[in-house]
Amino acid sequence: MDFLSTVDELKRHQLNTSGKLRFSVGLYAEYKAWLISKNESIARNVLLIMLFFWSIFWLADFFRLYGQQFEYRNMPMIDIVVSVRSLVLLYLVGLFAWLQRAAVTYKVGYLWVAYFVLATATAILSNIYHEQGEYQSAWLPIVIVVPLFTLPIGMTFASAIRLGLSVLIIIGASHYIMLKDLPDHSPNMFLASLVLCMISGAAGSYYLDKVFKAAFVALKLLELKTFTDPMTDLGNRRYFNSFGNKLVEDAIRTNKSFSLVIIDLDHFKKVNDREGHEFGDLVLIRFSELLTESSRRPFDLPIRLGGEEFAILLKDTKGEDAMVVANNLLSKCKETRYPEAKSTTFSQSFSAGITEYVQGDNLQDMYKRADKLLYEAKSNGRSLVLLG
Ligand SMILES: Nc1nc2c(ncn2[C@@H]2O[C@H](COP(=O)(O)OP(=O)(O)OP(=O)(O)O)[C@@H](O)[C@H]2O)c(=O)[nH]1
């Protein structure tokens, strides 16, 4: 896959959609897909072994420290610091596994696997061979974890360093507190480890940032294509189903309502016949722009269901309020002038049916209700919005 052109395409696309399209495929779905995927078994097994190793490593670290705490120091906070740190690291390794899947999918991450293996090996070896006491170097594996803080993809080099530094300060400080009373603790060793971690953390962050930004962009582009109508850049029927079902779930959980508007342009066949198909397309595009303008709140979702049929999903909106939105849209639609039309008096109207969610509804029930009203509007002379 050519990532540079992908990034450019995504940028173009995002400009057109003006941020209206929201994505429903999240990290969780990706992670699940990774777990069930059959094709990437090698990468998955390697990572699961790593994960296992890490669990053992950090748990052992914890129990060793726990076992020795009374011998070396009297700090009740030590247990908490160590266990929280171990949990956070395990969680981050889980996230790393997800990121690695993305890397394997987009065939850009093998260098990262090498980095991971190398850093882990360094950590084990430094632990085994350190003569003065293992804890000075026990936190070296942090070099692997720090780059994970580039997770908010889109990070710059400067922010990767900033994040790397803050993580190191937090973990370094907690480690220092744990170690400072050890009889064989060497401050120079501590300092050297800190610098090493800082450098590799920042370098790793920078590299990871580049790699995963590309993978992330490719993933988003795929979602964008799946859910977008190519002519109007509105969400398509697939997106309608996905977002609409989510609204139903939200409504069940929160007891809040939402409304659905189904719109069908009037006499559109005649528009095509009289003015030509190309002009018909232009009307559809202009109407989509109006639809986007009138769906002003962040969770108003305009959709092209297909042909000359559109919908708006209005979150937290009562039927009467949706009626106001639809009637304003109808006025604007009729007022729109088309200098491109052969007929100077050309204007486009639509008919619409609106319904509000009632407990027990599913999306299909709502669609049927709104569609019935829409056809009532059609048979009552068109250019009409009905609520029911
Ligand atoms: N130009 C253009 N026309 C389309 C597109 N999709 C569907 N159409 C046309 O939209 C028209 C829909 O016509 P009908 O379903 O008969 O309905 P209508 O003429 O709008 O009449 P009413 O809905 O009863 O008001 C058909 O002529 C389709 O060819 C498109 O992408 N571009």
Image: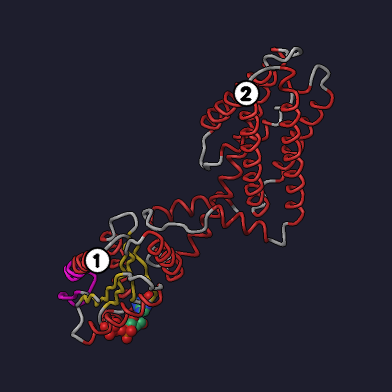
Write down the residue under mark 2: 76
**The CB of the residue at mark 2 lies under 8 Å from ligand 1:** no
| Classed neighbour count for the residue bearing mark 2: other residues with Cα under 10 Å, few (<14), some (14–19), many (≥20) | few
Can you give x and y, in whole percent of width and height, for residue 344 in the image?
16, 74
Q: Earlier in the sequence, mark 1 or mark 2?
A: 2
Q: Which of 371/205 is in front?
A: 371
- Residue 311, label in figure: none
- How many angstroms separate mark 1 from mark 2 (CA)? 59 Å
Q: Is residue 334 magenta?
A: yes
Q: How many marks?
A: 2
**The CB of the residue at mark 1 lies under 8 Å from ligand 1:** no
Residue 63 seen in the figure = yes
**Quadrant position of the N terminus in the picture:** bottom right
Stretch in magenta: 330-347
User: What is the three-letter code of the residue carrying label 2?
Assistant: Pro
Question: Does 55 appear above or below 243?
Answer: above
Can you give x and y, in whole percent of width and height, for residue 62 in the image?
71, 31
Q: Quadrant of residue 207?
A: top right
